[in-house]
Image (cartoon, rainbow, N blue to C red):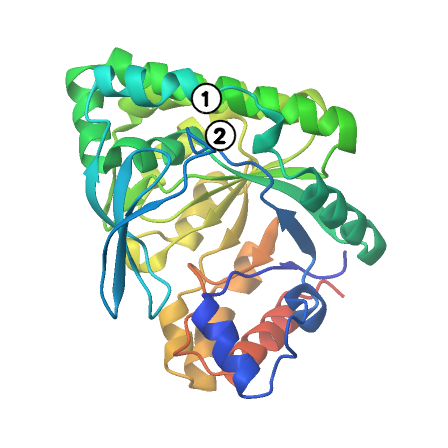
Amino acid sequence: MDRIGLYEHFWGDTLSLWTKQGHLGAGESLEDHFGFDLQSVWPFNLTAKLDVEPVIVEETEETILARDGNGALLRRSKTHDTTPEHVDFAVKDRAGWEEHIKPFLTPDRARINFEGYRAARQLAAEKQRFFTWGGVGVFELMHPVCGHEYMLMGMAMDPDWVKDMVLTFARVTTQLMEILFEEEGWPDGFWFYEDMGFKGRPFISPGMYREIVQPGHQQTIAVAKRRKRPVIMHSCGYVAPLVPGMIESGVDCLQVIEVKAGMDLLQLYRDYGDRLSFMGGMDVRTLYTNDKGIIDRELSSKIPIVKGNHGYALHSDHSIPNQVAYESYRYFVERGLELGSYS
């Protein structure tokens, strides 16, 4: 290509507002509207008990508290998009995992959205977009079952239990991949979602990553590598210490590179730009200002450098919230691609 790549994630509140304001048509494709280069689809459901409807425990005007098919009691907002609050979990240890979750994690065809995958793959081919299978990685699959607190305590106090969770999720994921791709064809690439950090720290040490999580990453990423497909790995939070292990696991592109958590796109480029591509790292807080001068300074301080190895795609460092005006995001795209031109 003669320019850097382009993709983005948005909060649902943002799309609702921009549609109400007339910038987007109802149901309009964001890929078409902004000219994104990538199309992705999430075709797997790895909730333990697929046939269990969420049970509402409590409901107010603003929130709903429900227990899901993992036995997790989560409180979600009814008024805006947000991460659910962890309230309680049926699984707090190895015994809970072996009773409530593990026996139900089978490669059931009902876990696969064949039709959605087929449609997205066909559309990507028609539009000449890079098409990725998207899915939740092994680290991110555990906390919906037992929460971060019990998961992390388990890593310290009963690591064999957490290793079993990792390898079980890796096994069922690869089994589902084999079923789907055999019938519907292979994607151009793979995109794993793994939020392994918070502000200033990863959830786990590099040693713990290599001992407990990396075997699951290697197993699932091996599916892509056998077909020479590139692998994108998303992680919110500060994960710089984990990057060498992620590269060892076969990750080709790191996304989303969250600035406010402490991630530094330019330092990552200096350290790993010969081995790793990047998507993101543009501080979304600069877009909150809706000031083109501030947005321009963010873009111009980074893009001319990180485009150097032809391995960068423009993306914010998280997702676009509804504080960002449509015109500001449009400027972000147009100016970013101008700076990212190779012609």
Residue 185 in view here: no
Q: Residue furthest top?
A: 160
Kindly state the secondary structure of the residue where label 1 is placed.
loop
**As displayed, is residue 181 above or below residue 36?**
above
Badge number at residue 105: 1
Residue 64 located left or right of residue 33:
left
**As displayed, is residue 138 above or below residue 273?**
above
Where in the figure is residue 237, as x and y percent of width and height?
32, 48
Determine the residue positioned at 25% across, 36% down.
147
Q: Measure the alpha-carbon separation of dots 2 and 1.
A: 28 Å
Q: Which residue is mark 2?
A: 247
Q: Residues within 10 Å of mark 2 (few under 14, many from 20)?
A: some
Determine the residue positioned at 25% across, 70% down.
61
Determine the residue positioned at 35% across, 23% down.
101
Q: Amino acid at mark 1?
A: Leu
Where in the figure is residue 3, as x and y percent of width and height?
70, 61
Q: Residue furthest right?
A: 126
Q: Residues within 10 Å of mark 1 (few under 14, many from 20)?
A: some
Q: Amino acid at mark 2?
A: Ile
Where in the figure is residue 125, as x and y percent of width and height?
82, 49
